[in-house]
Image (tube, rainbow, N blue to C red):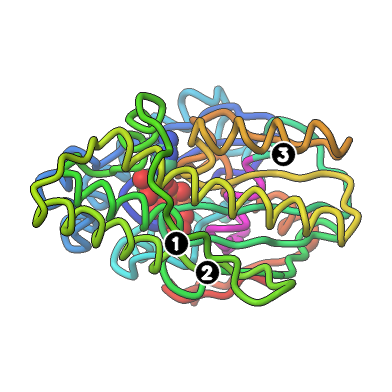
Amino acid sequence: TIILGIETSCDETAVAVVRNGTEILSNVVASQIESHKRFGGVVPEIASRHHVEQMTVVLEEAVQASNQTWEDIDAIAVTEGPGLVGALLVGVNSAKALAFAKQKPLVGVHHIAGHIYANRLEKEFTFPLLALIVSGGHTELVLMREHGMFEVIGETRDDAAGEAYDKVARMLNLPYPGGPHIDRLAHEGAASIDFPRAWLEEGSYDFSFSGLKSAVINKIHNAKQRAETLKNEDIAASFQASVVEVLTEKTLRAAREYQVKQVIVAGGVAANKGLRKELETKFADTGIPLLVPPIKLCTDNAAMIAAAGTIAFKQGRRSGLDLNANPSLLLK
Ligand code: ATP
Ligand code: MG
Ligand code: FE
């Protein structure tokens, strides 16, 4: 089965061709980060306009690089949500136009299902499986008992992990997106500041990062008032220590409770070196196999959408030409 995937939920215009949901034939990503940087975040109007400008070029490049013809392609998978509505619409409408023109089945894909299935481009899944999704807009623990079935067992009650990274980075005057910068600084500093850990109620797999974010902001303000010097490296290291500890501990606990056979990590924050190292160390002792995708597959791309779309396609799921973008689509 050969699936062409399209992803435009946020600020990357991406098209990819994937065979059997496991083998990348092409994976083209046009990032808009440079255009949004000076605004310190993604500007929805600008994102949509860039997607429109980039789509045709990226699409042609992806098809050509895959060495496949349109006849070889079995279906078109597209991110239908969640994300920025104007951005999603560009992908959805391109996919619909292609499905109509080339007479191909159309499959709508949940963006987070895509992030999860990025891992299957590396290694086959074994169920039950636990996925830790940590991205710009999501922080979730998802249990999968079989392909295409997602049970959200925990999620953030306020900010997403990536969002917290980006907001703290902004406080430290680091460029957008701030996650990679905090990660780098964290390795040059010491976790000497005792920031809170949001464990929430006993047994909860939910997350919360807004308290931590406020604690960091307060710390910076107080230090300024007292004319104390705080090293950015130490703030970054201390902030990261809190995020990583909570993410790792909750993932470990859920993996044991649900007796999963595999743990996977997905989303942009999965690129975090501190998180990868801590998860690898802690899971090595459990005997539960941990799969962390290469960084290129952690951030937004269309190979992951094609990979998730392959399963949906094989399960007989189809979208009509009335498919619409759904900015608040639920994972299920
Ligand atoms: P979503 O997938 O929830 O819709 P998104 O697509 O914007 O959101 P991703 O592209 O998956 O999110 O991830 C982007 C986020 O990952 C940003 O918040 C960025 O700061 C963060 N990030 C990237 N690299 C790192 C890193 N090394 N450490 C921490 N955070 C990182
Ligand atoms: Mg992004
Ligand atoms: Fe994403």
Q: Is residue 37 left or right of residue 109?
A: left
Q: Is mark 2 within 8 Å of ligand 1?
A: no
Give the camera-side residue of 159 and 193. Answer: 193
Report the magenta residues as a range.
104-118
Q: Amino acid at mark 3?
A: Arg
Which quarter of the figure has residue 187?
top left
Residue 206 visible (yes or no): yes
Image: 307 above or below 150: above
Q: Secondary structure at mark 2?
A: loop
Give the residue at mark 2.
Answer: 156
Q: Is mark 1 within 8 Å of ligand 1?
A: yes
Q: Looking at the image, is mark 2 or mark 3 nearer the viewer?
A: 2
Q: Amino acid at mark 1?
A: Ala
Give the residue at mark 1.
Answer: 160
The question of residue 125 being in magenta is answered with no
Mark 3: few, some, or many residues within 10 Å (few <14, many ≥20)? many
Mark 2: few, some, or many residues within 10 Å (few <14, many ≥20)? some
Q: Is the residue under label 2 in contact with that under label 1 (CB below 8 Å)?
A: yes
Where does residue 90 sit, x and y in percent of width and height?
A: 33, 60
Where does residue 78 sit, x and y in percent of width and height?
A: 51, 56
Mark 1: few, some, or many residues within 10 Å (few <14, many ≥20)? many
Give the camera-side residue of 136 and 123. Answer: 136
Q: Earlier in the sequence, mark 2 or mark 3?
A: 3
Seen at 24% across and 58% down, the residue is: 48
Which quarter of the figure has residue 112?
bottom right
Q: Secondary structure at mark 1?
A: loop
Image: 320 above or below 168: below
Q: Is residue 288 left or right of residue 136?
A: right
Seen at 89% across and 46% down, the residue is: 261
Q: Amino acid at mark 2?
A: Thr
Give the residue at mark 3.
Answer: 120
Q: Secondary structure at mark 3?
A: helix
